Amino acid sequence: MKIGIVSRTDKEEAIELDRNIVKYLLANHVEIELDTSLAKELEEYSDLETPIEDMTSDIVLCVGGDGTVLNAQHVLSPKKIPILSINMGTVGFLTEVDPEDIFECLDKLLSYDFFIEERLQLDVLCDDKWITVLNELVLMTSQPAKMLNLRVSVDEEVVDEVRADGLIVSTPSGSTAYSMSAGGPIVDPRVDAAIIIPICPFKLNTRPKIVPAESTITVKFLKEGKQAIGVLDGVSRENFNYMDEVKIRKSDNAAYFVRFKKNFYNSVNNKLIVG
């Protein structure tokens, strides 16, 4: 088994955990690839440096929070490389393992005592290019305290005309992120669906909607002079103007995660209590 490691490098505890993981894996004769930013921090292992774009590992350990996981999987999911996520962030809904349990989990990993969970992703059409998101697309006004006027269609059928502070189109994975804070439902990641959530809508009958993932969702900007910002997984940012359209569809590329037990509901409940 070849294992890659990517990590946040702004936290000393994370770097020290990375160092101990490398020692453990080398002691177990595992081939290792270290992402460039981490290899710079672990100078004694600089010969293991491999940019994440060039990794060919069987599994990649991702040490950090949900932001670290999202950044890594955007590169790894097209290559179908599963991620084992280790929580060195805050709540970490996408993470699987707490730092104190990592070596017990690595024992299971090297014994092949795990399974791979496949997570749905969405493709978003922006400026004639498709961008893949694991969590969500967030549309918001570029002017604070101003509302957006949006027409939302599903498979060319208009489902709502929304006046709101913004709109979220989320995957089930993203249903425990911004979507949940905006009043959206928590959706089991096994459900093949997309969730449309208005942010602080003006009309009381504008409610969140769950639609089949195979649908094409179209959002059109209806108010002249209103510019909007689209934020994709908190990573990419796009600008939209009057009469622009955003299209969202199910991605051909899934995201893959190493799991040791099926505990979605227990995990969510525990993280919400901690959070």
Image (tube, helix red, strand yellow):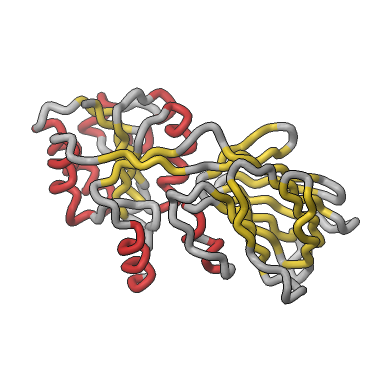
Give the answer, above or below, for where 195 lies relative to 7: below
Side of 35 relative to 148 (left or right): left
Q: Which residue sits at x=12%, y=27%?
A: 29
Q: Quadrant of the N terminus?
A: top left
Q: Position of residue 258 (x, y in %)?
A: 30, 41
Count of numbered labels shown in the rendering: 0
In the picture shown, does residue 272 fall above or below 135?
below
Left or right: 92, with 78 as reference point: left
- Tell me if 42 is positioned left or right of 162 in this view: left
Which residue: 41% across, 47% down? Answer: 68
Could you say where residue 249 lies in the image, as x and y percent from the top left? 64, 40
Identify the residue shown where x is 35% and y is 26%: 50
Residue 83 in view, yes or no: yes
The residue furthest right is 224
Residue in the picture at 31% in, 55% down: 88
Q: Position of residue 121 (x, y in %)?
A: 52, 42
The answer to which image quadrant residue 60 occupies is top left
Image quadrant containing the C terminus: bottom left
Residue 186 x/y as whole percent: 48, 63
Instruction: Please identify the residue farthest to the left as the structure is shown.
Output: 27
State whether residue 90 appears in this view.
no
* Res. 47 image quadrant: top left
